[in-house]
Amino acid sequence: MEYKIIPMGEGTWRIEDGHVRFFLLVGTKRALLIDSGISVCNAKEIAQSLTDLPVELLNTHADMDHVRSNEEFDAFYMHPEEEANYRRGGRKGTLLPVVDGDVLDLGERELKVIHLPGHTPGSIAILDVKNRVLISGDPIQEHGRIFMFGEHRNMPAYVESLKRLVQFADTFDEIWPSHADIPIKPEVIPKLIAGAEAILAGEVPGVPMEMHGRQIHLYDLGFTAFLCD
């Protein structure tokens, strides 16, 4: 499967892997791979082609399109509330827990963990403090489809997570999601909150469709869409 490596600034790359992307951030002491793709099975090898520093792995969450190359690593950072989702697929490796407020220092580059439950229980975003960028995983998208169907999705928790994220909005200028448009502006967050609340209130018509063998509904908000039970 072909992939594309795209520079995003000094010591920063995104790897486009089909419909998903993952990121490499490099500090002065170590590098961090954020997610490990869906099609590639050599994300670590790709990362090591870009830096001589040791590469570690953090997962924004455990959905299958974010963890394909995890087996290259003996250990990985992940929110502990995501472990059940991760192990459900029989995946191995040592989980190094990170929780809301934790800071990973790559060497003159601090990355702050922000817990965003809803899309999954252990979904997290990563704030690149110095560069004022939020790497958001799946919960924030523009012109994409946010998956909110299945047993571990929780729309009310999703809304509360985004409401809490608003208080961080003055700390980042751009959002880099795992899917759809990149970059996007923080102004999309209030729009997502309003849209999700309208769906919960029954104010947005849902279009029935089938995905992954189950019947769901598509809620099109114009600027993005939600897929819900």
Image (cartoon, helix red, strand yellow):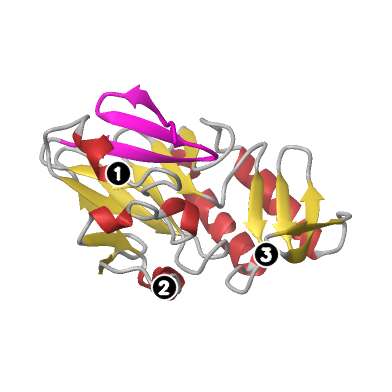
Q: Amino acid at mark 3?
A: Phe
Residue 229 can be seen, yes or no: no
In the image, residue 45 lies at what x, y percent?
Answer: 23, 40
Position of the C terminus by quadrant: bottom right
In the image, residue 188 lies at what x, y percent?
Answer: 62, 40
Looking at the image, which is closer to me, 81 or 84? 84
Q: Residues within 10 Å of mark 2 (few under 14, many from 20)?
A: some
User: Which residue is pictured at 30% across the width and 44% down the height?
Assistant: 42
> How many angstroms separate mark 3 from mark 2 (CA)?
18 Å
Q: Is residue 69 above or below residue 26?
A: below
Q: Which residue is mark 3?
A: 149
Dot 3: element: loop
Task: Write the start and end of the magenta stretch as one range.
Answer: 1-27
Check residue 13 for magenta coloring: yes
Q: Select label 2 or label 1 by which is in front.
A: 1
Among numbered discs 1 and 3, the one appearing first in the sequence = 1
Dot 2: element: helix
> Looking at the rendered structure, which numbered label has been put on residue 42?
1
